[in-house]
Amino acid sequence: MIIIKCAKCRVKVFKYLKVGKGRILHCWKERIIEDYSIRDGNEIKCHCGNLIGIDEGKWIKMKQRSFTYSGTRTKR
């Protein structure tokens, strides 16, 4: 379980179940445990207005450098 936070204001955006190694390029919607984001059409934003990602159906394509994360990743 990792916590994804906004890079600008450090507010929680998602609680996400990360599986495997590597960077977060996109977040699968079924692995998002808690969602604190604001939806504006297909854009996912923080409360401060920072664009976090774009909704593309089954996943959210994350915008690099607009978020940080902490926590432990689950191994396959």
Image: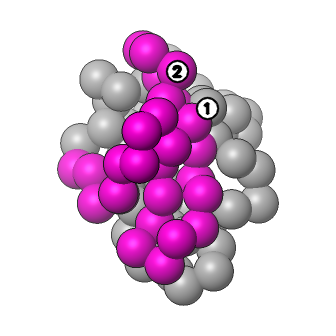
Q: Nearer the viewer, residue 72 or 27?
A: 27
In this rendering, the answer to whether 13 lies above or below 19 is below
Label 2 sits on residue: 56
Name the residue type under label 2: Glu
- Whether residue 50 sits left or right of residue 19 in the image: it is right
Examine the structure image and report whether residue 42 is included in the region drawn in magenta: yes
Name the residue type under label 1: Lys
Give the residue at x 48% y 58%: 45
- Whether residue 52 sits left or right of residue 74 in the image: it is right
Residue situated furthest bottom in the rendering: 9
Give the residue at x 23% y 50%: 34
Sequence-earlier tag: 1 or 2:
2
Residue situated furthest front in the rendering: 41
Residue situated furthest left in the rendering: 34
Q: Nearer the viewer, residue 71 or 61?
A: 61
Task: Specify the segment rendered in magenta.
Answer: 34-60
Give the residue at x 52% y 71%: 49
Give me the disc on residue 61. 1
Label 1–label 2 contact, CB within 8 A = yes
Q: Position of residue 70 (x, y in %)?
A: 52, 64
Q: Position of residue 71 (x, y in %)?
A: 47, 59
Would you say residue 20 is visible in this rendering? yes
Count residues near mark 1 (Cα–Cα under 10 Å), then give few for <14, some for 14-19, many for 20+: some
